[in-house]
Structures are given as C-alpha cells and as structure tokens.
Amino acid sequence: MLDVAKASKSLLDIGHILLTELLLEIMKTTSRESEVEGRIVNVSSSLHPDGYSEGIRFNTINDEARYNRYYAYAQSKLAYLLHTNELTRRLKKEGVKITANSLHPGMIFTNVGCHDLLLSCLFGLSGLFNKTKTVPQVLLELPQYMQPNIYFRPKCDDHQIVLLHFPGAATSCFLALNPQVKGVSGEYFVDSNVGKQSSQAKDADLAKKLWDFSLSLTNAK
C-alpha cells in the first residue's frame, strides 16, 4: 500500500495540488463574477531537469531503499512544472480566465540546507563573493535595504545568483501582480523572464499521468 506521507516527502507536489483543487472552484466563480483574471503561481527550480531519468518514479515512489534526496528534490520540482502545464491545459479547455505559471526563484539562502552538508557548503561559499557581476534590472530596482542580500558566484548566469528572502520573491510577485503577464499561462519564468523548460516538463502524457496519480492520493475530485 502507498504511504501518502512518504510519497509526499519524495514528490512534494501533493500539498499544492490539493490546495489548488480546493480553491479552484472558488477562483473560477470569482473570476467569472468579477471579470478579473485569476493567477496561480508555482515555485519550481532550475534543478527540475536533474532528477531521475524517467522523470517521475511512480512505481517506486515509496521505496526507501532506492530513495536519493537530491534526485527526489529535482523530481519534486519537475512535478511542479508538470502540474502547472496540465492545469493550464485544463483551464484553457474550460475557457476560464485563470492563468498558471511556474518559476525558478534563484538560489535562496533559507534553512533548507541547514541539515545538508553539501548545500550548507555551497551557500557558505556563495557568500564570499560580493556584487561584482552584472545584476538583472529587476534586482537593481529593489529598495536599497535589500541590495546587501544579493550574492554572486563567479562566471555564472544571472539565474544562479544567490539571494535572500525578499529579492528571492521578486519573480513570484511579478507573476502574481504584474500586468505584463496578463493572459500568459503555462510558462516557466526565471528572473521575471520566460525560461526554458526541460523536455520532460513539456511531456503532456507525463503531466496527465502525474495529475491522475496525485488526485488518487488526495482523493480530490
């Protein structure tokens, strides 16, 4: 029998799928009555292509012997993109004025790495570098008190910048509030710009299978 709690640890998409399902009918009604666009924003990661070769391990989701926390993390972030894309397909089919997008927030310096030696080392090293690289315009426009929270690794792309909490929320806020993305749905954003999804993230059959699998765990209809 599938242990939902353990599956949630491995997949990490169960909670947000259930929350979306519980709120979706309310969002649809509100959007229709107010004629205001609803927006759903899911936080994924640039690590979403770096998981298991098959993408989502449905048959071994509860197998502790084959569990790898790094692959499982990447698998969970792939699941966020797949859910977002399947949700977009369904909303468009219904003709509902609700968009769904996913994003990579940047490497955020939170407590997620406190109990992981490798992540702690990466975060620690990143803090040794100061602001000497080119900064995305969206970050330059942040209030001055947020500017010291921006760190850089040498010879890296902008999306690999290490941020603290406030600037790390910039893309999430952009997708939730900015009129520039009105009507945009099913996209993956990095630094408030459309980014590149992996081929697995764009796999419609895999997205549908994950949708059905997740709903079977939550019993959401």
Image (cartoon, rainbow, N blue to C red):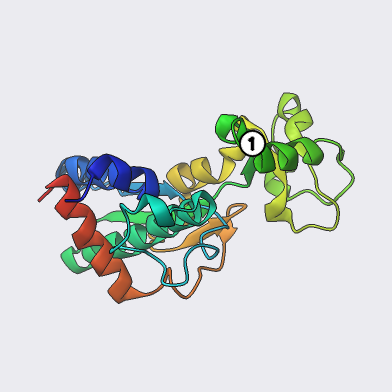
Residue at the (36%, 63%) spot, across then down: 82
The residue positioned farthest toward the right in the image shown: 132
Q: Quadrant of residue 60?
A: bottom left
**Residue 53 visible, this angle:** yes
Q: Is residue 108 above or below residue 63?
A: above
The residue positioned farthest toward the top in the image shown: 145
Q: Give the residue number, with chain letter if any, for mark 1.
A: 167
Closest to the observer, 146 or 130: 130
Residue 106 x %, y %: 63, 47
In the picture provided, is 140 more to the left or to the right than 4? right
Residue 124 x %, y %: 77, 35
In the picture provided, is 93 more to the left or to the right than 154? left
Residue 179 x %, y %: 47, 50
Q: Is residue 80 above or below residue 204?
A: above
| Numbered disc 1: secondary structure | helix
Closest to the observer, 42 or 10: 10
Q: Is residue 52 above or below residue 43?
A: below
Residue at the (23%, 45%) spot, across then down: 3
Specify the amino acid type for callout 1: Pro
| Callout count | 1
Residue at the (51%, 68%) spot, across then down: 197
**Residue 182 visible, this angle:** no
Q: Within 10 Å of the Cα at label 1, are there few (<14), some (14-19), or many (20+) other Cα atoms?
A: many
Residue 80 x %, y %: 39, 54
Residue at the (86%, 50%) spot, across then down: 133
Q: Quadrant of residue 89?
A: bottom left
